[in-house]
Image: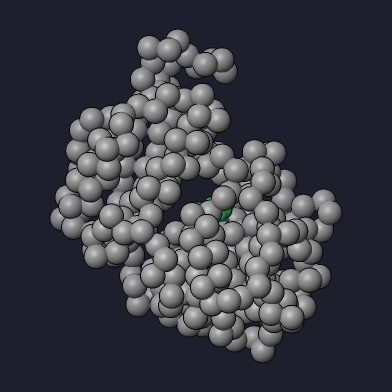
Amino acid sequence: MSRIAYVNGRYLPMRDAKVHIEDRGYQFGDGVYEVCEVREGRIVDERRHMARLVRSLGELRIRTPMSLAALGIVLREVLARNRIGYGIVYLQITRGVARRDHAFPPPQVAPSIVVTARGLNQARNAALAGNGIAVISVPDNRWGRVDIKTIGLLPNVLARQTAIDRGARDAWFVDRDGTVTEGASSNAWIITQAGTVVTHPADHAILRGITRAVLFDAIKARGLAVEERAFTLEEAYAAREAFVTAATQIVLPVVSIDGRRIGDGKPGPIATALRAEFHRYAEVG
Ligand code: PLP
């Protein structure tokens, strides 16, 4: 079965799903995206993802090209046409197609919309979480507005590849103050020896993860102390547990950072429990 993508009003087989070479996403990375988890064919936390999408579009002054209700119908249609049970749905909106010029095109230029979906292997994801992952640290050399979910991901791409080249799974960005901001495609968390769960505040230096937001409810329900504050790499090395969150992988325990074992080098009990409990707190549409 050929995968089907939605491109600017049409559902097309992947091989025919194309955008113009002067699309501003292609030329400038001038666009935004969202990724939602799909379980039993249903979209997890759609409302929050769409709210973040609208915010990202607003920050870049890209017009919201269709109502959120219509967008929801497109997302579901793509899922149905690709028969996705467990997987992800990807949505990208760019500033549209116009002759190449850095300045915004005239207002009548319509934004471009692409939606794709793919299945994920649930057993493989569970095995990954069961083993835990290794991360490395890299300098955070991104621009100052990574709270906007733009498709301009070159530093993230390079960081992830550096991680893979060094035999790790993810990279944690560290800013000039020695503070861990977030992962290359995830939010970064530690649990201190005192048992406090710590993650970077949701300012302009990180993406305000939807998984991150929902996890606060799970953490509070467990009665755990939680702090949104900057933590250093040194503090992370000395943590009792560490983990990352993202819509595609929910909670993934981190068992080493820069080759140093975290805790006893096995997935931590709290991270593992939070992963198991997460979907009690997520919205499913
Ligand atoms: N931070 C970055 C840089 C990301 O790319 C992502 C997800 O792709 C996240 C954090 C986690 O966000 P969410 O939980 O909404 O998937």
Q: Position of residue 45 (x, y in %)?
A: 38, 55
Q: Nearer the viewer, residue 91 or 210?
A: 210
In the shown orientation, is residue 4 left or right of residue 144? Answer: left
Q: Is residue 39 visible?
A: yes
Q: Residue at x 68, y 60 (%)?
A: 228
Q: Nearer the viewer, residue 221 or 20?
A: 221
In the shown orientation, is residue 31 left or right of residue 282? Answer: right
Q: Is residue 158 visible?
A: no
* Snapshot quadrant of residue 17: top left
Q: Position of residue 97 (x, y in %)?
A: 40, 20
Q: Is residue 275 above or below residue 116?
A: below
* Snapshot quadrant of residue 223: bottom right
Count of marks, rendered view: 0
Q: Position of residue 68 (x, y in %)?
A: 32, 36
Q: Position of residue 102 (x, y in %)?
A: 57, 18
Q: Residue at x 15, y 55 (%)?
A: 1
Q: Residue at x 51, y 80 (%)?
A: 272
In the shown orientation, is residue 228 left or right of residue 9? Answer: right
Q: Residue at x 19, y 46 (%)?
A: 77
Which image quarter holds the C terminus? bottom left
